[in-house]
Image (cartoon, coloured by chain):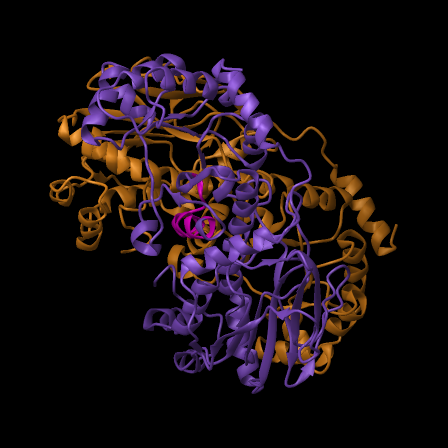
Chain colours: A purple, B orange
């Protein structure tokens, strides 16, 4: 069984409900909507992501012979259930917000209308795909906001939750404004720019740090970013500056990044490496990056790992997929604290004169409001409609971020210049 | 490219370092150790997991033609690099703690000894696999400790970080003492018991709750767990109790689970359903479960979802894979706050007379200590040695948990009985 595409990658109850639906011929059209009930702490907005993978899943949905074999032998189902599943395909319609759209709680970002068994079965994997990428894109967009003009690279594969998480995190982060990823597979899979420097082990394996640098610079002429903190950062920076050839940059991965980046900048400049960049990494998140940016630390690019790919401060969203209509009648759930708005819905977004977000209205389908409707058709009769390329989604997200009100405190260019002059001793 | 097995599922810098190692013929034996630097808040111990998948990865490591094509065309590498990679296999030795072993910071749980390029390349995916399952097994073991004697089911696929995370979380949780998972694929893949009830949508799609219950009970005679909180929990419980046939149980998914479970228990008992179980779910974690258990809420089984499969309170560990020896010489990193102990190491564990953990000693290999050595050979020359079955690992973990000191506050059986009598009105 394919661990990424098997329809058994679902909750068992989806299958038991399916058998019951088939037995009662409950196959009329069901409408489910996917939305987030509330913002987690640390998030001002969310970014929709994962639609491309969700639609590919729906279009490819089928039970392979080995899946059906398990269904037959598991003891959980009636004898004829597997036969029925063999024919099952997803034949429904889907509306969704384009990937990269900023959204808020209670706004459906995806709506499925399909015969009940199909619409029900896909709940688990649809949520699994859309929830995760939305978690990461939302986190990445908040990091992007904290680092205007800086390079941002995803460094988090090693502590992402498995292979798919690592790979899709690279995609979601790029979509939300990161410049690329360290994950090599993200390049052939998604066309995402990939970046890499060197590890401490490379330096340690050599008899001397200077030897390691010389060796790496020779292997990657004009393109080497040297990691300078294995033993002593400032000494490492001096050795990097003295390495033969053009230096692309250095990476700092520990210690007081603000102070060290200033000292390292001076070392590089004094040695004539004014174009060499300073790359910083090591337990970075949007708060630490914002502090470094506000302090005017001369860091050009940040590598963000674990905090990004696990969305460590908010590793999940209260994302749900709820039945809103069955057989033409609106439905709702009234469970304590978990009640939902019934019926097929649309989200209308109105901008103010300055192009900033003014108001979103969630209403029943057909009740037109000022502004633009955010949910548009993306699949008809189980077939995907044309979707934008990743670069377009990325631009859509960038434009959406620009419509947020500006951060309250801004450090003016004049103040940044003064800080820079003080650091360089030219004030 | 296979998203789960491609060796491009690594950081780009592993590949750039590889090219540099080959150019300098730095192919002598490197020893790397995988360990966790510190416990996150909320964890008293960790549980090693993910070794089976890690060894399968090492044994199967090879570059497929499409991987090599990308290497050649990416522009990141020299022309002859792909030719060299075509031959690459993992030929090293691995020592590790058996899965299910409880461990603590600074204790290596896995050690790789292999020619430098091989040992370096595998860092990212090894960490990705072992880190994630260790995160989940550690979380699950803490949940298990909070719920002695209670059923525990993993409900978390929908909000797990992707497909692999959901599937491996089911495995890691089962290994650490959960009774099973809702993830269907976990059954054919790992032989894990799978469980399922019904969703709110099933109830909503019917014209009446009673009709939904009757229908589900008819589809799964003697085996139906009915979800009773879609509209009103107590009314739902009465309807479940009145459903024709034998009732396996009911599920509560919202509201005050302590109060509701007592009231629902009385409704079931009064209707003669004394064997029917009460299943609870909805934003549960070890703290909420411990509170319900301490209060004596008559809940038989808990479904734990998001908090388990994202390890929400500690979604990552400070897990690293560090070079300890190269070409026979011990190495260490001295970066600020990240220094490591050098050399090949072993962990010795001594129990006290009562069979509880007394002391672990981390020392250099060959320096025998009292107790048992925790790292044992699991792979030789790139071939896996015989490994225990999942059931054995689970028993190993159970036995390890029993060696922890007992929790400080225990609710005595007499007090539990009184609470139960009060609830049933028989006190």
Depth order, front residue of A163/A193: A193
- The magenta-colored residue range is A159-173
Q: Quadrant of residue B281?
A: bottom right
Q: Quadrant of residue A407?
A: top right
Instruction: Name which residue lies at 22% across and 20% down.
Output: A244
The quadrant of the image that shows the N terminus of chain A is: bottom left
Q: Position of residue A79 (x, y in %)?
A: 44, 80
Question: In the rendered image, is residue A296 in sight?
Answer: yes
Depth order, front residue of B32/B246: B32
The quadrant of the image that shows the C terminus of chain A is: top right
Question: In the rendered image, is residue A294 in sight?
Answer: no
Instruction: Name which residue lies at 33% across and 16% down.
Output: A271
* Residue B413 appears left or right of A216: right
* Residue B72 appears left or right of A413: left
Above or below, B270 against B402 in this view is below
Q: Quadrant of residue B416?
A: top right
């Amino acid at each position: 069984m394919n661990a990424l595409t098997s329809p058994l990658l679902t909750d068992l109850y989806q299958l038991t409900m399916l058998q019951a639906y088939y037995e009662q011929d409950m196959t009329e059209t069901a409408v489910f909507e996917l939305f987030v009930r509330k913002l987690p702490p640390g998030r001002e907005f969310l970014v929709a992501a994962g639609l491309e993978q969700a639609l590919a899943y729906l279009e490819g949905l089928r039970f392979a012979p080995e899946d059906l074999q398990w269904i037959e032998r598991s003891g959980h189902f009636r004898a004829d259930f597997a036969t029925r599943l063999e024919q099952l395909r997803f034949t429904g319609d889907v509306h969704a917000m384009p990937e990269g759209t900023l959204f808020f709680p209670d706004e459906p970002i995806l709506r499925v209308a399909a015969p009940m068994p199909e619409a029900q079965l896909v709940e688990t994997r649809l949520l699994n795909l859309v929830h995760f990428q939305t978690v990461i894109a939302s986190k990445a967009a908040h990091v992007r906001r904290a680092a205007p003009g800086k390079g941002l690279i995803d460094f988090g594969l090693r502590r992402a939750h498995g292979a798919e998480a690592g790979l899709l995190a690279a995609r979601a982060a790029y979509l939300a404004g990161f410049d690329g990823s360290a994950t090599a597979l993200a390049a052939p899979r998604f066309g995402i720019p990939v970046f890499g420097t060197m590890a401490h082990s490379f330096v340690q394996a050599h008899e001397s740090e200077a030897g390691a640098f010389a060796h790496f610079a020779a292997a990657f002429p004009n393109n080497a970013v040297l990691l300078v903190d294995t033993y002593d950062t400032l000494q490492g920076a001096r050795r990097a500056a003295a390495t033969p050839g053009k230096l692309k940059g250095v990476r700092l991965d520990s210690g007081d990044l603000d102070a060290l980046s200033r000292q390292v900048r001076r070392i590089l400049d004094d040695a004539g490496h004014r174009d060499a960049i300073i790359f910083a990494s090591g337990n970075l998140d949007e708060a630490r990056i914002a502090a470094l940016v506000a302090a005017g630390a001369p860091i050009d690019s940040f590598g963000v790992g674990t905090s990004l790919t696990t969305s460590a401060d908010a590793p999940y969203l209260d994302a749900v997929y709820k039945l809103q209509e069955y057989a033409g009648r609106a439905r709702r759930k009234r469970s304590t604290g978990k009640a939902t708005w019934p019926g097929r819905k649309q989200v209308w977004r109105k901008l103010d004169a300055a192009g900033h977000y003014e108001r979103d209205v969630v209403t029943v389908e057909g009740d037109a409001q000022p502004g633009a409707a955010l949910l548009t058709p993306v699949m008809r009769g189980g077939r995907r409609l044309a979707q934008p390329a990743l670069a377009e989604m990325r631009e859509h997200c960038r434009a959406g971020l620009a419509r947020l009100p500006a951060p309250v405190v801004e450090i003016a260019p004049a103040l940044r210049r003064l800080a820079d002059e003080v650091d360089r001793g030219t004030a």
